[in-house]
Amino acid sequence: MVNDASSGQLTSDLVPPEIAGIRQTYHRSIDPESPEETEKRLIRHLLTLNFDRNKIAQQLNMSRATLYRKMIKYRLLEKKILSEQ
């Protein structure tokens, strides 16, 4: 094995995968999700699991009022709740 390191140090990126025991995997390209989409998906998921809204707000480190505002923004509130407000 030849050390091709210009600095004189052998780093992990210079070690062939078959020696390091690491298989290279090729990931298909995925479109990154915006933070808003991630938050919307997470809130929707927790609501479908019937988590208590106070607990959801606590876990997401936000007030319950902020959670409700985001639920309105993301259209995650049921119509009957919107008509009561």
Image (cartoon, grey):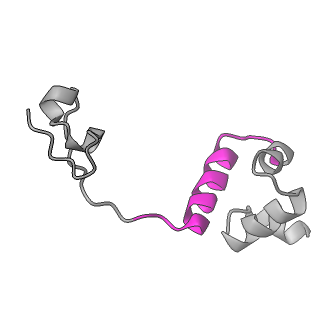
Question: Relative to 70, does residue 11 appear above or below in the rendering?
Answer: above
Name the side, left or right, on which 50 lies relative to 39: right
Of residues 62 and 45, which is closer to you in this image?
62
Q: Residue at x 69, y 48 (%)?
A: 47
In the rendered view of the protein, which quadrant contains the N terminus? Answer: top left
Pick the front one: 3 or 18: 3
Which residue is painted at 67% across and 69% down in the image? 75
Main SS class of the magenta portion in the image: helix
- Examine the image and state in which quarter residue 82 appears: bottom right
Q: Position of residue 71 (x, y in %)?
A: 73, 64
Residue 53, image x and y in percent? 81, 48
Looking at the picture, how far across and down is residue 33, in whole percent? 47, 64
Q: Nearer the viewer, residue 83 or 37?
A: 37
Write down the region rendered in magenta. 32-53
39 to 11, vertically: above or below:
below
Q: Is residue 33 magenta?
A: yes
Q: Is residue 47 above or below residue 77?
A: above
Which part of the image, by quadrant, shows the C terminus?
Answer: bottom right
Residue 79 image-quadrant placement: bottom right
Left or right side of 18 for 42: right
**Residue found at the very far front of the displayed protein:** 8
Identity of the residue drawn at 86% across and 47% down: 54
